[in-house]
Image (cartoon, rainbow, N blue to C red):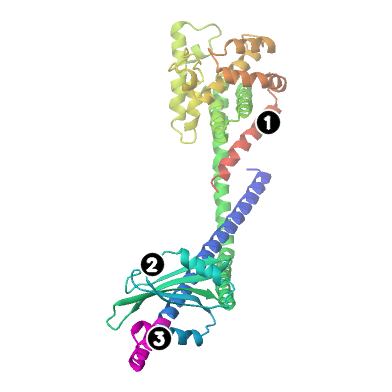
Amino acid sequence: MSPAASESLERFVHKTLLQRLVLMTLAILIAVGALAFVLERQRMQDYVREQASNAIHDLVGRTRILAEERGLDTYAAFRQALAERVNNPLRRRSGDFVYAGFFEPGGAPIAETRDGNHPNLDEVERSVIERPLREPAPDESVAESIEVNGQPYIYVVIPVKDRDEQVAAYTHGIFALSEAAQLGFAQRIWRSVFLAALIVIATAGLLYPVILRLMNRLSHFSSNLLEANLESLALLGGTIAKRDSDTDAHNYRVTIYAVKLAQAIRLETQQIRALIKGAFLHDVGKIGIRDNILLKPGRLDEDEFKIMKTHVNHGLDVVSRSVWLEDAVHVVGSHHEKYDGSGYPVARKGDQIPVAARIFAIVDVFDALTSKRPYKEPMSFEKTMGIIREGSGTHFDPELVEAFVNIAEQLYKGYCGREDQGLHKELDEIVRHYFSTEVQSLI
């Protein structure tokens, strides 16, 4: 790998690692904040439930005393005890009940008390009226957070038991959190988030150099492996090309043509990578064809052509032995198929032929017709395009032919007949552009 490419990869690793650490920190902070909110809300609900239970216990005890001392019936003693409580309210720093109502099992009302000075009293009472009466089990109670006019409240329902521990009535009330309680609620949440942030940032700071070093090593190993694979791809493709040609420029040109056409139809990156491999190795199976047939200057007879066609199966055998090359089978195995089903080796037709093979079939013929060979002169662009158009719907995919027509003249002017080093350099840039993302996807 070149120093520039290595430096670029290190920057990518550094940037990616930082992004992931930041995202991880934010995710943890959000999770901790949500957990702290739930726990604090539950703590506040439990506190209000406990305060309400204590107040009711005191109220019931005072009711019994008044009933015994003054000979009142239970409900009259209860209303007297409730009046005493209203006249001598117990103010809590966390807030207080702004409404409390008592009702018999079944819903019949017994008594109510309210804080007439509370600014949201009407809305609070409306909220109570709109709620269905609930009668929890004797050993259970209800505590729920609600919001009235944008302010937080806690709604409670608690059973009131008699001397025999039987439910004699229920109370439901609305507890208003004081400003101090709301502030403390928020402070405890932010304190939890802040402590979590410190822990996460400190941990990330300690782990960052270690993770960065490991990721850099992984990326370099992956890049070196990719470099070796690409070199082997070019070497194998070039070796096969030189068996029936003096140069491997045909491989370079058809690969560039294929990528340009794939870009024109917006083929996905992964498919373009497979197309590049297949274009380099489309004739790799010719390694299994005898020279007297492969290099024969004249037309092949029927038996010789049957043997020549076996190069497709030889090619499939070669690429199927490599996991990295296995996606090249689409081009290697189907580049001689024809759109109307008259091709070989399987006689696939239409969309049964992989799109990479349909692309390659067009550009392979285009380069063959416009290139000079020992046995022929190059064909003109106009005549070549006439043959391509004529093959639309029979040899070639009509939609791909239409897309190729739009870029063919530009390709002809830029690459036709070229065998210079610049051709190799441009193809190398194309290949590295598409395969560098393969390395980055591992990180």
Residue drawn 58% across and 45% down? 440
* In magenta segment, residue 242: no
Q: Is residue 101 left or right of residue 205?
A: left
Q: Is residue 342 left or right of residue 259?
A: left
Kind of residue at disc 3 = Asp
Residue drawn 57% across and 17% down? 398
Q: Main secondary structure of the magenta part?
A: helix
Disc 3 residue crowd, few under 14, some 14–19, many 20+, Cα 10 Å: few
Picture coordinates of residue 81 (x, y %)? 42, 86
Kind of residue at disc 1 = Glu
Secondary structure beneath disc 2? loop
User: Which residue position holds label 1?
Assistant: 426
Residue drawn 43% across and 18% down? 346
Q: In terms of sequence position, does the residue under pointer 3 or pointer 2 come before the other?
A: 3
Q: What is the span of residues highlighted in magenta in the rendered image?
A: 55-78
* In magenta segment, residue 62: yes
User: Which residue position holds label 2?
Assistant: 134
Secondary structure beneath disc 1? helix
Kind of residue at disc 2 = Arg
Q: Is residue 19 left or right of residue 319?
A: right
Q: Are marks 1 and 3 in contact (CB under 8 Å)?
A: no
The residues tagged by marks 1 and 3 sit, at their Cα atoms, a distance apart of 89 Å
